[in-house]
Amino acid sequence: MRIELSDRTKTLALELLCQFDSHISAKSLWKSINGEFPFKYRCGDTAFSALHCISYFGIPKVANSLIKMNRWDVNQKDSLGMTPLIWAARYGHEELVGLLAQKQHIQPDLQDQVYGRTALS
């Protein structure tokens, strides 16, 4: 989707992401992320939202659509204290970082709970 996003693909992604919290794909993503951290990361116990997910993958057009829905807080922290902006910055998704940084209520100085880092650090 990062390379080329058709209207149909975007629609399918939004349908999935709108039910992300209870979808099996959320558990699969948590499992894949779990290998990066030295502690347990549990799906369902976290605030890892659809906006966190799309920030992890770095797809700005889908993120923008999610933000316009006003269902997800752009400053929401997951169980590691990471916001969607931190996820996007961590993986070098520059276009998405720029999109999120322009949002009116964004707080770029929020720190994660593991290293105390912000999106800018």
Image (cartoon, rainbow, N blue to C red):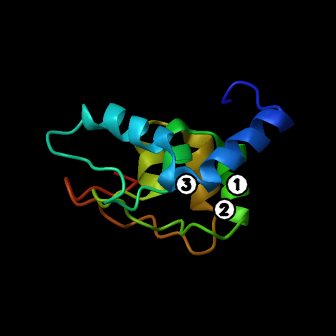
In the displayed orientation, state which residue is furthest to the right.
7
According to the picture, the residue beneath numbered tag 2 turns out to be 67
- Circle on res. 96: none
Q: Which of disc 3 and disc 2 is earlier in sequence? A: 3
Q: Are marks 2 and 3 in contact (CB under 8 Å)?
A: yes
Residue appearing at x 68%, y 41% in the figure: 13
Please indicate whether residue 101 sits to the left or right of residue 10 in the image: left
Quarter-of-image position of residue 39: top left
Q: Nearer the viewer, residue 117 or 18?
A: 18
Quarter-of-image position of residue 94: top right
In the displayed orientation, state which residue is furthest to the left.
38
**What x and y, as percent, mark residue 89?**
45, 45
According to the picture, the residue beneath numbered tag 3 turns out to be 51
**What x and y, as percent, mark residue 76?**
44, 67
Distance (Cα) linking label 3 and label 1: 9 Å
**What x and y, as percent, mark residue 86?**
41, 52
Q: If the image is split into quadrants, where does the N terminus sit?
A: top right
Residue density around tag 1, few if under 14, some if 14–19, many if 20 or more, within 10 Å: some
> SS of the residue at dot 3?
helix
Distance (Cα) linking label 2 and label 3: 8 Å
According to the picture, the residue beneath numbered tag 1 turns out to be 64
Residue density around tag 3, few if under 14, some if 14–19, many if 20 or more, within 10 Å: many
Q: Give amino acid for label 2.
A: Ile
In the displayed orientation, state which residue is furthest to the bottom.
105
